Image: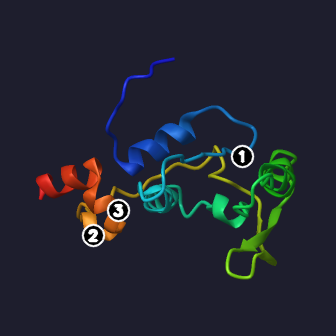
Amino acid sequence: MDRQARVATFAELAARILALPSERPRLVAVDGPGGAGKSIFATRLSEALDSAPIVHSDDFATGEPGQEWWPRLQCQVIEPLVAGRPARYQRYDWERQSLVEWRGNFRRAGLDSRRRVERPPRRRRLPRPSDLGPRAARSPFGARLAARR
């Protein structure tokens, strides 16, 4: 597997994801430290994938030591999608410190393999470091963005 870094537009990345052979839904995970821009990245990739659903791990994680969140994600989202059933999950509310409303009822985690992204990529401004929060503005990533402006 080629591990060399590449720069691509969200439309190009979406096209690469859709080009992968699959009879099942495609699940894309976005990983990184807090303030790195995971939510922004996931939103823009979702838009390029015709508004594919986004499931945030914050809706599962409780922050409690020893409290596992992965089994709920697997049981409520991943297993139903793989089996071809709609996925629903119960969101964890950090302020109430409890499970609250159910979300979802979606059947896909990407697009059906018969569809393609056809619209041209939209021209967007680069995010400002301030768009990503105070910690990101001081990070090496934020410094690189500021230098590109």
Label 3 residue SS = helix
Please state if 28 lies on the left or on the right of 8 as rendered. right
Given the image, on which type of amino acid does mark 2 rest? Ser
In percent of width and height, residue 83 lies at 87, 46
Going by the numbered disc 1, the residue's amino acid type is Pro
User: How far apart are the two marked residues, 3 and 2, measured between alpha carbons?
Assistant: 9 Å
Asked whether residue 44 is in view, the answer is yes
Q: Which residue is mark 1?
A: 25
* Quarter assignment of residue 85: bottom right
Q: Which mark is residue 67?
A: none
Give how far across and how far down residue 97 sits, in percent: 76, 76
Nearer the N terminus, badge 2 or badge 1? 1
Q: Is residue 122 visible?
A: no
Callout 2 secondary element: helix
Q: Is residue 79 above or below residue 130?
A: above
Mark toward the start of the polypeptide (3 vs 2): 2
Identify residue for label 2.
130
Q: Amino acid at mark 3?
A: Arg
